[in-house]
Image (cartoon, rainbow, N blue to C red):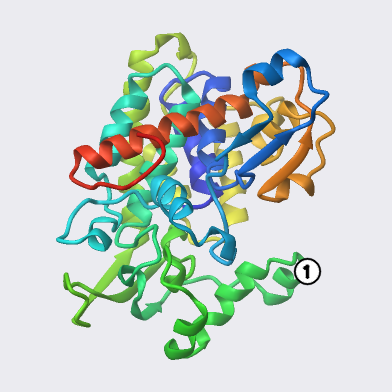
Amino acid sequence: MKKDAHYYALLAMSRSVGIEKETAHKIAYASQFVDDAKVNKITLAADNPSNLLSQLGDEIINAATCHSYSDLSTYNYSSMTANTSAFHFVPGCEGRNFPKKMRCKKESKIIKFIVEEAVNNADPIKLGITLHAYADTFSHQGFSGIASKVNDVEGVRENNKILSEISELIKEKSWKQIGTRILPFVSEQKRDRVVPAYGHGQVYSYPDIPYLEWRYEYDATDNFSSQYQVSRVKNKERFIEAFKKIKKILQEFLENNNQYRDDSIVEVDYEEFTSILTARKVEEERIADWKDFMLSNGLLSSSDQNIIEYDHNRWLKEAFKDFINCDFEKRIVSDVHLADDFLQSNWYQYYWGTQWYKKAFFKAAEKSGLSIPNNYS
């Protein structure tokens, strides 16, 4: 799923069930930030306050929850299991061998275990992180978070996709999106040479487009004997089912944490909600519709611009002094100065939320019969 679902739809749903604004914002922001947290290692400047350095040491590591499939440095076991699989392709634990067990399945045993932990916790950031992974089990089902034959597919087709103008994408330097526009016109044999069998790379961004209807062929055998089956997908059905379930999770979280309740909210029309969620529009148009929806239904007001406009750097700006965006686009950032209230910052709470999530992920995998070597058990 993309920002329109992970942030805006989740924000609207959180408010609709009666969660107060700031808490709903933390849930939605943490959910989307899973796709934006690129920094993996932060080295702290030596002249930071001594009390912070004594508590944190001289570096913060394993902070990233996303990376590009084109970044060769992330093609390692740890990134694939503790990042891509954990947060974006939660394994289904089904099959006779490790690659098959790593194949993502909606509402797998693993993600159900973590959801149960999250709703019984009072931390909205942990819930947001978990709901990102939970939502992706619906959209990414069938694919794996490790480079694997599972992801080597054929016969990829779609029949109702909106193509953005290439000239606009070039103007915005959206090279990744340009690639996904061009690749479908390249022969499958040539595509296999340039697109690795990692995640859903070989089916482009198709799983994350809420209105799309598409199909692909995958090897359904345990020994990868090239006996392919056709999978026909209607994303609309997947997205609607996912948010129907997410609504129940949010309601359970609120029942367990009444301190976050806003009694002034009236539940919205769910048909209107799903109509916006799966509209056949480009992402920016769906985001605009979500903003109108929340304002017109009293879920947010015009004074809530810091919530209405998602800024992927907001938590970073709050946590680090002298923040410069280009520095934090890298995976390793050096000589960083911390804000005075760093330990209370949302970014630091997010970081600890990801460490909590990873421990829960590997614990749940082991309980579900999938042993994944890791440093978090």
The residue at the point 34 percent across, 23 percent down is 119
Horizontal and vertical percent position of residue 151: 35, 69
Q: In this view, does 149 lie above or below 106?
A: below
Q: In which quarter of the image is residue 374?
A: top left
Q: How crowded is mark 1: few (under 14 residues within 10 Å), some or many (20 or more)?
A: few
The residue at the point 22 percent across, 83 percent down is 226
Q: Name the residue under label 1.
A: 171
Q: Is residue 246 above or below residue 97?
A: above
Observer-nearest of 209 and 69: 69
Q: What amino acid type is highlighted by mark number 1?
A: Lys
> Which structural element holds mark 1?
helix
Horizontal and vertical percent position of residue 164: 62, 70
Q: Can residue 141 be seen in this view?
A: yes
Q: Is residue 251 visible?
A: no
Horizontal and vertical percent position of residue 92: 24, 51
Farthest residue to the top: give it: 259
Observer-nearest of 342 and 292: 342
Q: Quadrant location of the C terminus?
A: top left
Q: In this view, does 336 lie to the left or right of 297?
A: right
Observer-nearest of 377 and 339: 377
The residue at the point 54 percent across, 50 percent down is 66
Q: Is residue 290 above or below residue 267?
A: below
Horizontal and vertical percent position of residue 314: 70, 34
Number of dots carrying numbers: 1
